[in-house]
């Protein structure tokens, strides 16, 4: 068996730590968006806000570009997240109305 270089082990540990941080941040983001969904439902607002979503995509693309990350990737990631958030908001709206 080939010995794994110490630098590779250290880099993998850093990646593991970052993955954990990403998951924790996403969990926190979804806790907040759940609260947004409840507020929207109780105020009779629609689950989706295309104008806000467009602004967020543009903002995230700029942030990604500034950070040296592919803006297309950032847009795909945010679109995936927003799709899930809207799905949650729709579910909250159904539960609130029913």
Image (tube, rainbow, N blue to C red):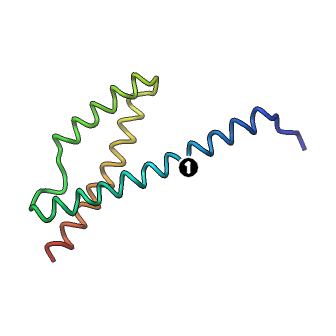
Whether residue 69 is situated above or below residue 94 in the rendered picture? above
Q: Residues within 10 Å of mark 1 (few under 14, many from 20)?
A: few
Q: Position of residue 56 (x, y in %)?
A: 26, 37
Quickly name the residue at label 1: 20
63 horizontally vs 68: left or right: left
**Nearer to us in this view, 11 or 74:** 11
Residue for point 27% across, 31% down: 58
**Nearer to us in this view, 2 or 29:** 29
Q: Position of residue 77 (x, y in %)?
A: 40, 41
Whether residue 28 is situated above or below residue 3 in the rendered picture? below
Residue furthest to the right in view is 1
**Nearer to us in this view, 21 or 91:** 21
Q: Position of residue 83 (x, y in %)?
A: 30, 51
Residue for point 38% across, 31% down: 72
Q: Which image quarter is the C terminus in?
A: bottom left
Residue furthest to the left in view is 44
Quadrant for residue 2, please give it. top right
Element type at mark 1: helix
Residue for point 42% across, 50% down: 26
């Amino acid at each position: 068996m080939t010995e794994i270089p110490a630098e590779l082990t250290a880099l993998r540990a850093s990646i593991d730590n970052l993955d954990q941080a990403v998951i924790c941040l996403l969990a926190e983001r979804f806790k907040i968006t759940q609260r947004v969904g409840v507020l929207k439902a109780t105020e009779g607002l629609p689950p989706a806000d295309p104008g806000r979503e467009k602004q967020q995509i543009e903002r995230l693309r700029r942030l990604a570009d500034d950070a040296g990350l592919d803006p297309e990737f950032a847009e795909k990631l945010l679109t995936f997240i927003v799709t899930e958030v809207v799905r949650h908001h729709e579910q909250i709206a159904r539960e609130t109305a029913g």
